[in-house]
Image: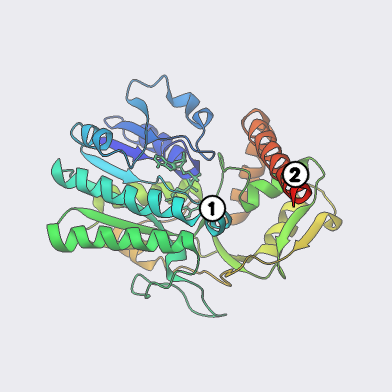
């Protein structure tokens, strides 16, 4: 199988490209990635020497390029997205362009060139927020609350329409929060690990009681692999770890694992529209495709912390870049204040 992996220089896409090349000796992987701030060629360094791997620097919204690639491949696994909720509050237009328009460009190319398998990597955030009980099933109505989740839900609707209208072999996965190696240090777990390794505070939103269901990225990749090979066209598959934790529990766990004091916890103003609880019912993918997560949270978080400890050369430059950007933004505020 010749597979286009969009967004393969990001967190989950790079793990997935590696997973496919290691698991399927006859598969070829072409990563298509425009390398936004979240894309990082260093996450693919070990794959560059593999003759079955190719990197293409380009935009999923570039229809000419996407059509050319689609004509040479059998399958598309679509990860490329703007993925950070906080950024979607200040720049929603970018999310619509990449997450919705990019998906339509890919679907059109897939239709034109007879792509045999198409997997849309979506998120549990499209379901909105849960109360203290209950789980998201594949039949839960979509109720996205942030521009990020609204753009992902819109893309899912386009994918659905290509199945209903054109009978295309498309599948959607909706996974809970991932953690693991190659996770950009703006997201909660890698941000906290890397801050704590510098003895810097860890910012916890609101009361810290928002609940997320955490899954190791390797288990997500395995689920996507199963859907790619054995999923039924037109179907949606929820993926989750059955591992609900409040943000403050995660924070205290990481503090304890790194031997740091609770005094480094800094409560910050809650994110607007912050969903309270996500929890996934993954019984369909377990039952129909035999998926089973291999990591439990304790072993997964230990492995992740070890990875960040031994891969400073991967994350230190990203952290420096983020700090520079924050300093530049703060300077801009001062300049504007002085002007007015
Ligand atoms: P990420 O932000 O780490 O990576 C996104 C990648 O997409 C980057 O490499 C970026 O350069 C690339 N990209 C962005 N715009 C592009 C464009 N226009 N053309 C080509 N490439 C582009 O994201 P991630 O955490 O790896 O998430 C991947 C996918 O999985 C997303 O679609 C996200 O919605 C979904 N997802 C993520 C999680 C999670 O916990 N991280 C959970 C469920 C679903």
Q: Is residue 1 above or below residue 330?
A: above
Q: How far apart in space, not on screen, are marks 1 and 2 (Cα)?
A: 27 Å
For numbered disc 1, what is the local secondary structure? loop
Q: Position of residue 281 (x, y in %)?
A: 43, 69
| Left or right placement of residue 13 versus residue 177 in this view | left
Residue labelled 2 has its Cβ within 8 Å of some atom of ligand 1: no
Tell which of 14 and 296 is nearer to you: 14
Residue 336 placed where, x, y %?
72, 48
Q: Is residue 278 left or right of residue 196?
A: left
- Disc 1 under 8 Å from ligand 1? The reply is yes
Of callouts 1 and 2, the N-terminal one:
1
Residue at position x 40%, y 55% from top? 96
Residue drawn at x 63%, y 43% as measured from the top left: 185
Q: Is residue 173 left or right of residue 135?
A: left
Q: Which residue is mark 2?
A: 335
Residue lying at 53% horizontally and 80% vertically, measured from the top left? 133
Quadrant the N terminus occupies = top left
Q: Which mark is residue 84?
A: 1
Residue 43: % across, % down: 51, 32
- The residue lying toward the viewer, choosing from 140 and 228, is 140
Which class describes the residues within 10 Å of circle 2: few (<14), some (14-19), or many (20+)? few
Q: Residue furthest front?
A: 340
> Can you tell which of label 1 and label 2 is closer to the viewer?
2
Q: Report the number of numbered marks.
A: 2
């Amino acid at each position: 199988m010749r597979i286009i992996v969009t967004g393969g220089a990001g967190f989950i896409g790079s793990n997935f490209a590696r997973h496919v090349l290691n698991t399927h000796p006859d598969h070829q992987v072409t990563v298509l990635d425009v390398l936004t701030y979240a894309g990082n060629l260093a996450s693919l360094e070990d794959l560059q020497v593999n003759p079955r791997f190719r990197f293409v620097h380009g935009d999923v919204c570039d229809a000419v390029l996407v059509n050319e690639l689609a004509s040479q491949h059998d399958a598309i696994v679509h990860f490329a997205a703007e993925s950070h909720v906080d950024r979607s509050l200040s720049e929603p237009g970018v999310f619509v362009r990449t997450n919705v328009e990019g998906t339509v460009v890919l679907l059109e190319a897939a239709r034109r060139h007879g792509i045999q398998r198409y997997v849309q990597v979506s998120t549990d955030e499209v379901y909105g927020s849960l109360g203290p009980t209950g789980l998201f099933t594949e039949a839960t109505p979509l109720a996205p609350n942030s521009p990020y989740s609204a753009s992902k839900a819109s893309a899912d609707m386009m994918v659905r329409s290509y199945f209903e209208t054109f009978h295309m072999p498309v599948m959607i996965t909706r996974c809970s929060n991932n953690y693991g190696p190659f996770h950009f240090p703006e997201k909660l777990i890698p941000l906290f690990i890397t801050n704590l390794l510098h003895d810097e505070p860890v910012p916890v939103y609101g009361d810290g009681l928002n609940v997320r269901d955490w899954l190791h990225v390797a288990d997500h990749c395995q689920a996507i692999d199963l859907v790619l090979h054995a999923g039924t066209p037109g179907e949606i598959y929820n993926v989750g770890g059955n591992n609900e934790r409040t943000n403050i529990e995660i924070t205290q766990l990481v503090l304890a694992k790194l031997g740091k004091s609770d005094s480094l916890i800094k409560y910050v103003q809650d994110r607007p529209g912050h969903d309270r609880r996500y929890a996934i019912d993954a019984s369909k993918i377990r039952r129909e495709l035999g998926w089973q997560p291999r990591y439990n949270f304790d072993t997964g978080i230990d492995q992740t912390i070890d990875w960040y400890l031994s891969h400073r050369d991967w994350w230190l430059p990203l952290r420096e870049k983020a700090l520079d950007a924050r300093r530049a933004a703060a300077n801009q505020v001062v300049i504007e204040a002085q002007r007015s």
